[in-house]
Amino acid sequence: MNVILTGLILALFAGLSTTIGSAVVFFIKEMKTSYLAFSLAFSTGVMITISFIEMLPKGIEAIGYEKAIIMFFGGAGIIFLVDYFIPHEYILEKVSNVKKQDAKLLKTGLFVGLGLAIHNFPEGFAVFAGNLHSAETGIIMAIAIAIHNIPEGIAVSIPVYFATKKKRKAFFVSFLSGMAEPLGAIIAALILLPFLSDSVIGASLAFVAGIMVFICFDELLPTAKKYCNGNSHLMIFGLLIGSLVMGATLVILN
């Protein structure tokens, strides 16, 4: 399959996982937060391992140590600025407000959806760039990002649903926020492909590694800790298992 089409499909898959979170809240009466904590920690292990063992070294190999490090922290810096100006709020912080007036709930849900859409944009860029490196890298990144997109769907859909009492509307808002991911991939295709070379791919991998590591430490781990119910060993176990699985996968692929 064409590498461009594959990258777009993977980004679409990662984005659509946001809607899974919306569906979950309608079909599961009581979600065990321990499952969520483990999944987020597992995703963290996967993303950190692929960033430091696969993507950043490939960037260093392609463009040199200094440039790769600059690109790495450039990626982290970009996502930091996005997070600083549009704070990333998660599930409990929004669910705790369900008893407030409907208008405020709807505004909350829409704002969270907008914030998540902006956060999802560079993730779509990341998936596409990873797929340019190899199909295996793109698939692994898409799956890891998809896992952490599920609770984001919950964060969007719950306040909208409680405000409107309409499941379809809550689902649709979540869907729109997730669609920022393939949009990011499309922009990546337009920007990267005309200048495609080993150096461009290497710089992109280092840049994306910075984005992913920041997401791990700023979003995934804190959220996993919030839902581990004091059982920090569950979070550490999930992180180590994710890292082990990713490491084993890289060994097999190489």
Image (cartoon, rainbow, N blue to C red):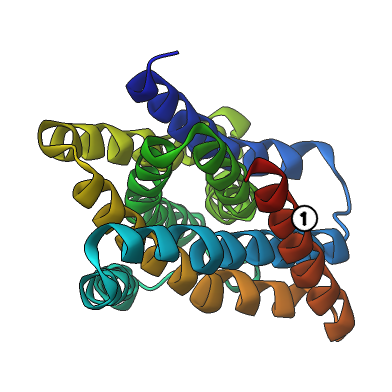
Q: Residue 6 or 25: which is nearer the viewer?
A: 6
Q: Position of residue 127 (x, y in %)?
A: 43, 43
Amino acid carrying mark 1 in the image: Val
Q: Residue 97 or 191: which is nearer the viewer?
A: 191
Q: Is residue 164 visible?
A: no
Q: Residue at x 33, y 45 (%)?
A: 125
Q: Is residue 184 visible?
A: yes
Q: Position of residue 225 (x, y in %)?
A: 72, 80
Location of the N terminus (image quadrant): top left
Q: Is residue 224 left or right of residue 59?
A: right
Q: Is residue 23 left or right of residue 182?
A: right
Q: Is residue 18 left or right of residue 1?
A: right
Q: Position of residue 245 (x, y in %)?
A: 77, 55
The relative height of residue 6 versus residue 162 in the rendered view (above or below) is: above
Q: Residue at x 68, y 66 (%)?
A: 45
Residue corresponding to mark 1? 245
Residue that lies at the very extreme toward the top in this rendered image: 1
Q: Residue at x 29, y 75 (%)?
A: 65
The relative height of residue 68 versus residue 140 in the rendered view (above or below) is: below
Q: Is residue 217 left or right of residue 11?
A: right
